[in-house]
Every structure is written in structure tokens, then in C-alpha cells.
Image: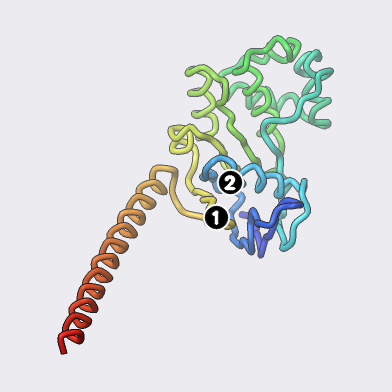
Amino acid sequence: MAQISINNLTFGYEGSFDYVFENVSFSIDTNWKLGFIGRNGKGKTTFLNLLLGKYQFTGSISASTKFDYFPYEIAEYQKQMPVAEFMEDLKPGCEIWRVICELEELSESSEILYRPYCTLSPGERTKILLAVLFSQENEFLLIDEPTNHLDQNARECVKVYLASKKGFILVSHDRDLLDACTDHCLVLNRCSIEVQNGNFSVWWENKQRKDKFAIAQNEKHRKEIQKLNHAAEQVAKWADKN
């Protein structure tokens, strides 16, 4: 099993006074299935782009595997190609027999390979792109919202498929998908990322427990401060009388 190690990663956008990430360090196993959790606009896509080498940063990202991203960027001319030709243009060296094996796992016929890409439904397009993605060897996959714009049947098919796979980071607002397909969580905090065992529900239960404890502690401290203030007032009154 290989490791991906992040050491003292620091990054901020040019012109901004704030860091998106500051001195972030953690390690993950390339066999893990990680859900990426965090509010919109807080840095999930930025972190994936850092892994892909799209931005300059300080610190280091060490990996013995390549990274690949879903969804692929597709040019207009590629959309007019038959799918088999489209795949070769998108991913040179892509082996069709491997893609066909992945399509079978996605309950999709290989006949789709002979249709123009532009004629495919959103579900069929997602299946093709996932099949190409998982047909590659020695890659750690970054999967961003794979069930967007899919009907319920296609969403279920993608969920079952991803649940059978390993070696990826999954970004999704679909909690059911995250629960079914992940065994670890990357949790995006302010300027940092932490790794936790378990799927989304495990993380959510732990978060609620911690939040409840923090609220109770704050209330306890508030009451203690009130008592101290009251005691100080009593002492002041006593001092005034004497």
C-alpha cells in the first residue's frame, strides 16, 4: 500500500491576505475511499487542483501514484466523435477492453462505444467517463460530484459502482453516496484539513457530539463567570458600606 503525504502545505490566492491552507500536514493511503467534507467555497476544489499540480504552493505533496480527475474537460470537437474515438483522444493509450469491463460493472452495454458522445444522456456520459477513469492503473482518483444531473436509477448505479472501488477522494453533496462509498473522511476546517476514520455518518455523529460538548462547556463557563461577577459585586457593596 502506497502513501500520499502532505507536509506543511500552504497556499493562498494572489491578491488575498488570507491563506486557503496554512501548514497543512497529513498522510492518506492510496487504497482508502475518502469523502471530502466541507462547506462550499472553503477550498475543496482548490485542494484537488493542488494535487493535480495546477497551482504553486509552499510545502510538499509526495505521492508514488499519479492523480486523475472526474469530470474530464471535454472540448467541443471531442463531443462529435464516436465514444471509442473520443476515449482515445481524451486519454491516449486507453485500452478499450478495460473500459468495456468497467462499463459492464456499470450495467452499460459496449454498444455505447459506437455512438457519438454528444448523443449520450447525462447518465451515459458519467458512466463512460468513470469507466475511462477506473480503467487506468496506478492512479489515485479525484472524483467531483459524479451524480450531478443524474436520475435516480443512474445515481444508484454510480453508487453501487463506486462502493466496489477503492483509491479515490469523492466530493459530493449526496450524503447517501458518501455513506455507501467511503471509509475515511477528509474534513476541511478553516485553513486546515484533518483525516478521520469512517464514512459521513460517523463523522457527523462525532461532530454533533463535539458540538454538544462545546456548547455545554461554554454554558458552564458562562455561569461560572456570572457567579464571579456576582461575587465581585457583593464584595464591592460590602467595601462601600465599610
Residue tagged by mark 1? 190
Q: Amino acid at mark 2?
A: Lys
Residue at position x 54%, y 26% from top? 158
Residue 92 to residue 216: above or below = above
Image spot of residue 37 (x, y percent): 51, 45
Q: Are marks 2 and 1 in contact (CB under 8 Å)?
A: yes
Which numbered marker is on residue 42?
Answer: 2
Residue 164 to residue 53: above or below = above
Image spot of residue 77 (x, y percent): 84, 18
Relative placement, left or right, of 157 versus 232 is right
Closer to the chain start, of discs 2 and 1, is 2
Which numbered marker is on residue 102?
Answer: none
Relative placement, left or right, of 2 versus 52 is left
Residue at position x 55%, y 48% from top? 32
Residue at position x 81%, y 15% from top? 81
Q: Regarding mark 2 in the picture, which secondary structure is present there?
A: loop
Image spot of residue 174 (x, y percent): 48, 32
